Structures are given as C-alpha cells and as structure tokens.
Image (cartoon, rainbow, N blue to C red):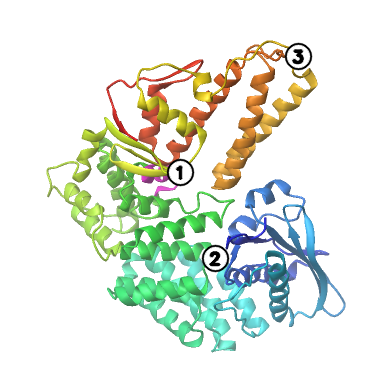
Amino acid sequence: MELIENKETTLAVLPFQVIGGHESISPLIQGFTEDLIINFSKFVGLSVISQLSTQNIHDLSDSNAISKLGADYLITGSFRKTDLGFRIGIQLVRTRDNKIVFAGNHDETLESVLKFQDKITQQVVSVLQKQIEQDLLSYSYKKESVDLAVYENWLLGMNEIKKGTTESDLKARGYFEAALKIDPMFARAYTGISLSYFNEWSCQLWDRWEVSQMGAHENALKAIELDENDYISLAVLGRTFLYLGDFEKSEHLFRKSLKMNPNDANNLVSISNGLLWLGYLDEAEQLYLRAKNLNPLQPNAFLPMGMLIYFEKGEFNKALGLGLQVTHLATWVDFPAMVAAIYYYLGQYDKVQMYWNKYLAIFKTCINKGKKPTNEEAVAWQKVVNPYKGKSNLEPFWDFILGKSTTKVPTPQKLLDNESEGSFIDLGEVWELNYAGLKVTIKNCKGLHDIARLLKQPEKDFHCETLMGSSVEAKGTAMTDEKAIKAYKTKLKSLQADITDAEELGMVEKAEKFKDEFETLLLHIGKVTGLQGKIRTTGASHEKARAAVTWRIRNAIKKIDNLHPQMAKHLSNAIKTGTFCTYSPETPHNWTF
C-alpha cells in the first residue's frame, strides 16, 4: 500500500540471518538489526514495526507471522563469511505483491559493518522516496563512528537491561562502564547506565529511591551533553524532572524526545505515561495507540498503560476491559490498586476490597520489607510513584480507602440515574454513543443503522427485509451448484479467521475490509441456499435478509463491546434478531438521536 494523503508507510526489519553457522558474530548481527530499526524509525513519514514483533520471524517463508505485521515493506538480509570479512545481502520487499524493489550484496570487514548501516539506511530510504513519492526527512538521523569493542559492550549491556532484574541491571552497568573506559565520549554508554538506574528507581530497589533517581538523572544529563539528540536519555530526563516537580522542563524534554524519534514503541509508551501525569490525556492516548500499532504481534504488551489512560479519562468500562486482560498483577506494584479504583467508580465494592488486598500483599513483599502495611502507608506510597501535576481520578478513591469519604461513588453516581437514558447519534463516518454516563465514538457500519432504527421504535417488530431494504423474489431456476457452495463455505471460514486476527492486532482497516467481503459472500450464500443448506432457485430473499441483518446487528454490538461493554450487554439482552427484529428492554429507555 503506497503512501496517500500523508499516510505513513510501515516498514518491518526482519532479523538478519547468519549463513554458515558462525554464531560468534550473532551479537553483532542482533545489534545490526536493532540499529537499522532505530535508524529508520527516525525518518518522518515512516512507521517502523517494533523489534518485539519481528525478532522471532526468521525468513520470508513465515507468511502467517509476516501478514500479521501489517507492514507495507519488509527488509530482510543475511551475513555470509568470506575470506576478508562478510558478504551482507539485503532485500527490500513490497508486501502487497511480494515484489523485490531493491536488492544488493556488499562485502565488508567486521570493522566496517557498523559504518555500512548508514549506507543501507540511505539506500533504502532513497528507494522508498521513489516508491511513495514523498521525502522522508530525518529530525536527528546521525550515526556515530564507534570502536567495535565499545559497540559490543553496548550490545551486551543492552541485552542485560532487557532482562529487567536487579542483577542484570548491575551486570549491564559493568558493560557500559567498560565501553566508557575505551571511549569516554560514547554517549550511548551513559544512556545505558541511566537506564540501569532508571529500572531500579521505577521498578525494583525502593529503599534506594534517591540514589537510583539521581543515577538515572545524572547519567542521562551526561549522555545529552555528548549527544543532545539522544531520544532515550531525553525521555529519562523528562521523567526525573517530573518527579523533581519541574513540570515545564519535563514536558519540554518529553516533546523533544518524541520529535527526535516518533516511532520507537517502548519510548512512545514512556512518553505517554509522562504526558498523562502532566494532564495531556488525549495526547497520551494517541501515543499509546501508536505504540500498540507499532507492536502488532504483541497486542497486550502495553495494556497497563492503556488501562491507566482510560481510567483518567473517565472511561471506566474500557479501562476495566484492558486491565482484566493483564495476567501479571505485579506488572506495576500498584497495578491491583488501579483496578480497585476502577471498580470503585463502577460501584462494585466487593471487587474494590479484593483488589486493594492484592495490592497490600504485593506492597508488603516488594516495598515494606515483609511488614504488613497500613492503608495510610499504601496510599502515601501510591501518591509518590504517580507524580500528577494536577487532579487525578485516584483522589476520591484514596479518600474512600482512608475513610475520609462516606460517599461510595462520587460524581459517577449519575451512572445509576442515567442507565435508562442514552444517545445514538450518526455523525457520518463515526457514531457517537452515550450510555450510563460513558460516551464513546465508533466507526460507521451497517449494523449501527439497523440498531438505531430499532431503538427509535421499541417493542415494534421489524421484518428483516424491511431493515435490509429487499423484497421477496419469484421462484425460478437453481442459482448455483454443490461445488460452488463448498468453496463459498471454505472462504467464509478463512475470512472469519482473518477478521479475528485483524481485530486482535488492532488493524481496523483490514478488519473492516474482511468484514465487508464476509458480508457480501454471506448475502450471496443466503440468496442461493435455503435453511437446510439446499440450493435454492431464484426465489424468496427473506432468508438472505434474515442472515445478513442478524450478522450486521451482532457484529455492531461486538464492536460496541470493545469500547463500552455495559452498553453492549444492554443491547445484546434487549435486541432480538431473526425473521423479525425487535428492541425490547426490561425497563423503558429514553434515546436521543
């Protein structure tokens, strides 16, 4: 898919392969691939899939995994040992037709491999410029000239950082310090040391809070002194200044980091978190969704961040939907406390206490050195680790936990009063739905029009043909044969799998395309076969209309469920589909259109 009307082109860099079993160079190759991803991600107009999604794809034959990436172009390559060094092969493949639009072989020595990344980056970008007819301008593309031993220490250190343990952070620090002994001006090493302290500070060694915070802060400053465009260190500094209460400087650093590299998924989530604390909820949501799209093979990687964003936006049902998908409750120490706060706003107080108790148990082990904490201690700590610049939806919840408020549900008490009211408004490309105090927008689809018609006239039976806009045809000749019917059914199963995969990966446009194709085929099958699956003659169309309308309505409710489970549950219970479709709620509802 080409870039049209400023739509970004998506690129995925697959791991470069070693041909001939020379595993001794594999760390270099791993770093080579990672550096290419970083280099490409700095170009405006180019989205680069996260390495988390590509690292286990070994070649172009893995078509299933590659299709899930949703990339417009793939870069794949190999290293082959030669007498003087390595022959590096590279291909740029357009996924829509599997056409190789660029290929080349390059003979390099081990020492020249690092510089060769510049050449590859510029070659591929040049080809892409011609392919998409748009200049890809880099804010900060700059490759350092690095001693090989320095670079290898950097790679080994970053591999340890990714393990996320106290021991691996200490080991990583050793590698980064070794790199600095060789080259004291190597900015990335200071970034690595900063990250090692940052891990301790934000996740692990709570009894060394100030030491870890200053270690992260001071080493990030050193990295910036050497390279003012180091986007990772800029983000770390933004976080440390946030905790120091310098909100203006924090925001400046977050935005500069984003400008330097708008396509690193992990960094986007970190900045999203910072902007959330600063009160920029809509921007935080946009960055979270972008990070999620850049990591399609791990759609659940950033769920906790999404939960926090929607909690602060007051979209409590949506926040709960994301939170309940997180399998590791200690992903953040106070993660269960956040879930408890969501249940508080939804009025489910038994769940509030259950998740608060889970938080206290984790707090006892990770923070309080085995000592049973009081509610006051647990709330005070949560306030420290969530440095909000302004108001937070957590504040009424904290008052409730501490017994300072006897009102169980604050402003959202209106939810109970509004359960019999709502709106279902067609805005053209999207619909605005409001129910039980929660407002969401959803992309237009035929089923929403069907639902709206039912809601406007409760208890009235609508014949499926009325909703479909069809009429009964006269009987005639056979409309297909058994072989065609078998092929149709096989295609339907394939499309159902495609729809499920696309929805799980957040690939909305592809999902809609598959659904349209599914609906078209379903309508055709309904037209040419009867209730018992027998081939019909050109005749009664009401079975076709019944199947199509039922699918449209149920599919629309499924879409609503992703954004507003409470509304979806009401509609699912109140709407009957079949030959006649009816909206029959248990209690009268007042809808605005």
Q: Is residue 385 above or below residue 63?
A: below
Residue 282 falls left or right of residue 104: left
Q: Earlier in the sequence, mark 2 or mark 1?
A: 2
Q: Earlier in the sequence, mark 1 or mark 3?
A: 1
Give the percent coordinates (x, y) of residue 145. Answer: 64, 85
In the image, the segment drawn in magenta is 318-329
As drawn, the label of residue 210 is none
The answer, for residue 163, to whether it is visible in the render is: no
As drawn, the label of residue 428 is 1
Q: Which residue is mark 3?
A: 478
As drawn, the label of residue 263 is 2
Q: Earlier in the sequence, mark 2 or mark 3?
A: 2
Give the percent coordinates (x, y) of residue 29. Answer: 70, 69
Does the magenta-highlighted stretch encompass residue 482? no
Give the percent coordinates (x, y) of residue 154. Answer: 59, 76
Q: In what quadrant of the picture does the C terminus appear?
A: top left
Tally of numbered tags: 3
Residue type at the position of mark 1: Gly
Q: Are marks 2 and 3 in contact (CB under 8 Å)?
A: no
Does the magenta-highlighted stretch encompass residue 324? yes
Measured in 3D between alpha carbons, the distance from the residue under mark 1 to the one under mark 3, in whole angstroms, is 40 Å
Q: Residues within 10 Å of mark 3 (few under 14, many from 20)?
A: few
Residue 116 falls left or right of residue 224: right
Q: Given the current orientation, which residue lies at the most extreme right position? A: 83
The answer, for residue 355, to whether it is visible in the render is: yes
Report the residue at 79% width, 57% height from top. 99
